[in-house]
Image (cartoon, rainbow, N blue to C red):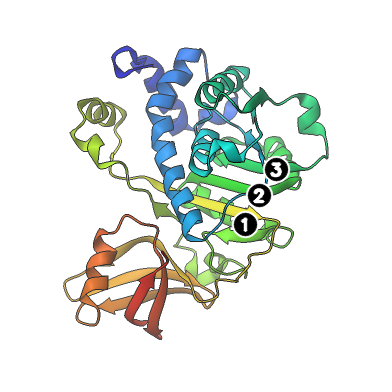
Amino acid sequence: MTWSNLDWPALDRLRQKFLSGSAQSGPYWESPADLASYDLTYGERIGWKWDQVLRELRLRAWKPAARDVLDWGCGSGVAARRVISFFGAENFDSLTVWDHSPLASDFAEQAARAAFPALRVASATPGLLAADTPIGLLVVSHVLNELPPVALAALRATIARAEAVLWVEPGTHAVSRQLTALRDELRGPLHLVAPCTHAQACPMAEPGNLRHWCHFFAPPPSAIYADPDWVKFGQRAGIDLRSLPYCFLALDRRAPAVPPADLGRVIGRPEHFKPYARVLNCDATGLAELELPKRAAPALFKELERTKAPLVYRWQREGVKLSGGEPVA
């Protein structure tokens, strides 16, 4: 699939289903061309979110131990391909894909075979999904707003079998809060790797924090702003190409080697005003709005405005006032 033969009507139809919520009513793929057009456009934008999540996992010094991957609710399969490419195909033995749409499973399987010729790739069988045998690395991407209760129960059962889980969702208030509730449900048997810097209950659930939600922003490749194909896509889809909000969870049955008790994670984006910057910070002490006077740390003030890296910091702070900070690198 290229930009010259993109199926624009199919993309318009898919966009309408996503916006209206009717995607929850069942499979919405009508042809392999649907999936190919999606993979080049919406799927690629999801891939940029995964790229940022994977960068953060590298900052946290995490990599999967399992050599087998299951992409649950795979769609076009972009999530698993990003994960395998990032960590190196040589570090995996197999990829299994599953989607409630056989068209999607077939597309994801074929795309993965083309990307990783040496990897064993297959679609999941009903027997595998119903079994209670362990699963290696479970990859889940952009499914929560499409899952009826029975499907969410099936996903919970699959998570219970996984050695590790990487889960990325849209960064909306509703979806993020749903993922936060699942985070608190899953912690214990599974250890929190990211985005959390602590293992306590999520402070977003506290009554005073209900207006907040755990979300972040991924940077698109800068070249797309001068790319006429991406500009046309953004205009037709009504999308701000600069905005890629997401939320995510990384979970592992292995306990972290060193608990990151001194780390803070910035939620959303820093806000910059003339004399100071303000960040919503989550760490082991809870959720707090912290202020950094520009004169206290001019270089950090500028960095917070310009950096594209995941905002994981060791702060120098007294109460809600920051005097400095170092990014995890």
The quadrant holding residue 313 is bottom left
Residue 192 image position (x, y, % from top left): 61, 61
Mark 3 or mark 2, whichever is nearer to me:
2
Could you say whether the residue bearing mark 2 is in a helix, strand or loop?
loop
- Seen at 71% across and 56% down, the residue is 253
The numbered dot on residue 48 is none
> What is the spatial separation of the Cα atoms under label 3 and label 2, in whole angstroms?
8 Å
- Seen at 41% across and 64% down, the residue is 329
> What is the spatial separation of the Cα atoms under label 3 and label 1, in whole angstroms?
19 Å
Q: Can residue 119 be seen here?
A: yes
Instruction: Kindly identify which residue carries mark 3.
Output: 136
Of callouts 2 and 1, which one flags the residue occurring earlier in the amino acid sequence? 2
> What is the spatial separation of the Cα atoms under label 2 and label 1, in whole angstroms?
21 Å
| Closer to us: 113 or 239 | 113
Relative to 313, residue 216 above or below: above
Q: Can residue 172 be seen here?
A: no
The numbered dot on residue 183 is 1
- Seen at 74% across and 59% down, the residue is 189
The numbered dot on residue 65 is 2
Name the residue furthest bottom: 318
